[in-house]
Amino acid sequence: MTSSPASPIETNAITLTASVKNNGTASAGASTVNFYLGATLVGSAPVGVLAAGSTVVVSKNIGAQNAATYTVSSKVDEANAVIEQNEANNSFTNPASLVVAPVASSDLIASTISWTPSNPSAGNVVSYSVSIKNQGTVASASGAHAVTLTLTNATTNAVVTTLTGSYSGAIAAGATTSLINMGSWTAVNGSYNLTVQLAVDANELAVKQTNNTSTQSFFVGRGANMPFTILEAESPSNATNGTKLAPNFIPGDFAGEASGRSAVQLDATGEYVEFTLTSSANAFVLRNSVADNTNGTVSIYANGVDKGNFAVTSKFSYVYATPTTLGRLGYDNTGTKAYWLYEDSQLMLDQVYPAGTKIKIQKDAGDISSIYVDMIETENVAPAASNPDPTKYVQVSSTKSIDQALTDFRADATKKGIFIPAGEWEITNKIFLYGRATEIIGAGPWHTKLVAPQSQSNTDVGFNISAAANGTTIRDLSAWGNYVYRVDGPGKFIDGNGVQNVTIQNVWAEHFICLYWGVNASNNTFKNNRIKNLFADGINMTNGSSNNIIDNNYARATGDDSFASFSAIDAGGSYNVGNRFTNLTATNVRRAAAFAIYGGSGNIFQNLYGADTLTYPGITINSYSFGYNTLGFGDLDTVIDGVTLDRTGGDFWTSVGADDKINDYQNFGAIWIFSGDRVLKNILVKNIDINNPVYFGIMFQTKSSENLAMQNIRLENININNPSRYGIKLVASAESGQGPVVGAASFTNVKVNNPGVQAIYGETKSPNFTVTRVSGNNW
């Protein structure tokens, strides 16, 4: 390959040239050469018929390019249209980089776009600021540099607000201005696009003006901001001739275990539920339930046109157990009732369908005899990504396994990691990462799928990261386990004790025991992940795991706490400190809480959304040891700030007799504060909305055999809406061996909004618990 001119500047048009030879013994049909700068396709050129042994030179003018250093490569017959003796030698990478030098010009960009508060909720006044950087080679002109910030609705593209600001004076080459106040906007829940446009500078050539406008996503609301939209089947906006289930809170019931506590049953040919897309989509996840020991299909239509079928199965649902051991007995049918009834099916269609398209799920002749439709996720999935840099990432292929690619990576110090392209790649054991930091990159979670053997069950697969591989990144792929019941120990997609600076990002994991159980794991990042249909915890940090960032993750149907911090020291370590659990969603939790805090010090749980826990609270704050060597809560505040909980709490039974009758039981509130056998202190719970809790909004309880007093418990700015029994419950007598409550708590602006129920229960019956009403309460 060659490029011309050899030393271009940004205003030069660049021509790339490749020499293509037919090394084979037969004539080659016509094909195409694709030219790349890094991972970006910048042009293509046709190659005519090539006789055996002949060579042709092809070129492509790729125009002017921005100043940078580029890796230049070309690939012939990338579509595999030509049958060849050797398909592995169709690419070439220039050993020398292409360096495009900058022109003499100013080059203004929006260097910083910030807002306060950083995680706004509806009603917050959001203040915006922008700074300008001149990344050019000469100073900007003096005078005013105008800045416009536009917020648009991500679904409709309608302009929501426009804010303006300005910076006066010359900006030196390489310099960045101070923050420019752009004004404010009162937040409304939703997804937005935030665009900042800088006025063209008088010293800025046209080639440097393309980056004067930048756009990024902006989300208002509690919980994770994911790329998919959820549409509930039972929504009044949907057309259906199926049976809409009456809501209830009963585990093991098709309504009680559904999102929103309702679903639609289709059990006759021609029955359907029809959704209207609120944003463009080409990929769908259907949460559904079919009869036990059943496989089949259900049909999908777009604007009345049959687009194929979802494959549906009960393989990973229907756990038979007693309520107490829910999830631990697996398919031990000594339990008489099935729980965990719902499962997901995935399907990508042939095109992107715009907002407004009617998507119908219909039971046709030949489909499953009956199906409960709970919800559908809709997503616009980009095409599969390619290897970001073939010179740095060893690519997995049909002839090079993941293990072999990792071996090649470790043998070459210039490599950064491996790339796993689109496809299903069977993994039969744990993949051990060692030696040095490793990047595992996929083509996107809808495209790169790591799959446990589906003819087996409970196979321990995934990644095991050694401390020698600290700094590892695993991103942009999905993993599909084969667990059908809970076993404690194996089954974590990510293993690794003592790991640091590891990043797990944009990973989609299903049918494992856990995504990750951290032991003495610190300074790690779990971000933008999807965690679904597990048999135990989603992410649990323990044994001195500190300063981790668990941000913008979505969990549905975990078999234990979705997101948890457990300050045990049975495997070493001390308090969990400095962890940030932010922007998280946890729904349809099967056996425990959406968010659980078992001790620690100085940890933050912020901007969370939890819904539809089947047996437990939305938030558990608990100092019980569970028989392990643990620490309680330390001297620094544990802060829970900005949470919405919908339909959380429930019943958990502690013993069931031989006649299947419940002998003892525990009702839980949406928030459960429990002083166990370790210290519970320094807890701040603020800015909480509790909606339609199963029993109570907030519940306080003490382990009766210990009687450890709660200390420095503060609750501020909390709305408890429509509790069915009490707004606040102080456990005043023993329930399952727990209670009465001991200690104290203060309440500021805590409101119970249901005149038909008692706002607080047990205050006069709890002589060893002090309720301090500071101000603003309505009880």
Image: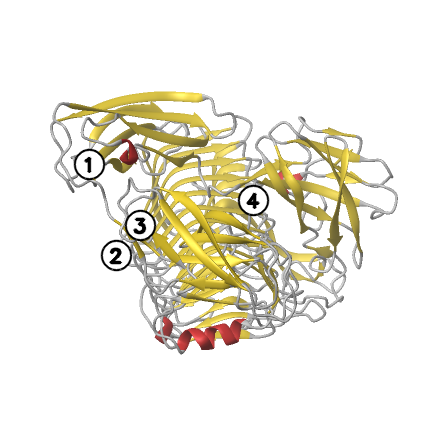
Question: Where is residue 10 drawn, in percent x and y?
Answer: 28, 42
Residue 401 vs residue 137: left or right?
right
Q: Is residue 594 toward the left or the right of residue 336 in the image?
A: left
Residue linked to disc 2: 635
Residue carrying label 1: 105
Please give left or right for residue 335 compared with residue 672 in the image.
right
Label 3 Cα neighbours within 10 Å, binned few <14 / some 14-19 / many ≥20: some
Q: Nearer the viewer, residue 474 or 567?
A: 474
Residue 748 x/y as whole percent: 33, 34
Q: Which mark is residue 381?
A: 4
Q: Earlier in the sequence, mark 1 or mark 4?
A: 1
Nearer the viewer's eye, disc 4 or disc 2?
4
Q: Marks 2 and 4: in contact by CB < 8 Å?
A: no
**Quarter in which the C terminus is drawn:** top left
Q: Which of the two discs, 1 and 4, sits closer to the camera?
A: 1
Eyeballing the image, is 747 above or below 495?
Answer: above
Front position among marks 2 and 3: 3
Q: CA distance from mark 2 to mark 3?
A: 65 Å
According to the image, label 3 marks what residue?
Answer: 5
Among the 4 quarters of the image, the one containing residue 276: top right
Q: Nearer the viewer, mark 4 or mark 3?
A: 3
Along the viewing direction, whichever of 80 and 220 lies nearer the viewer: 80
Q: Which of the colour schemes (rainbow, by chain, secondary structure, one colour) is used?
A: secondary structure
Q: The disc labelled 4 sits on which kind of residue?
A: Val
Rendered-image quadrant of the N terminus: bottom left
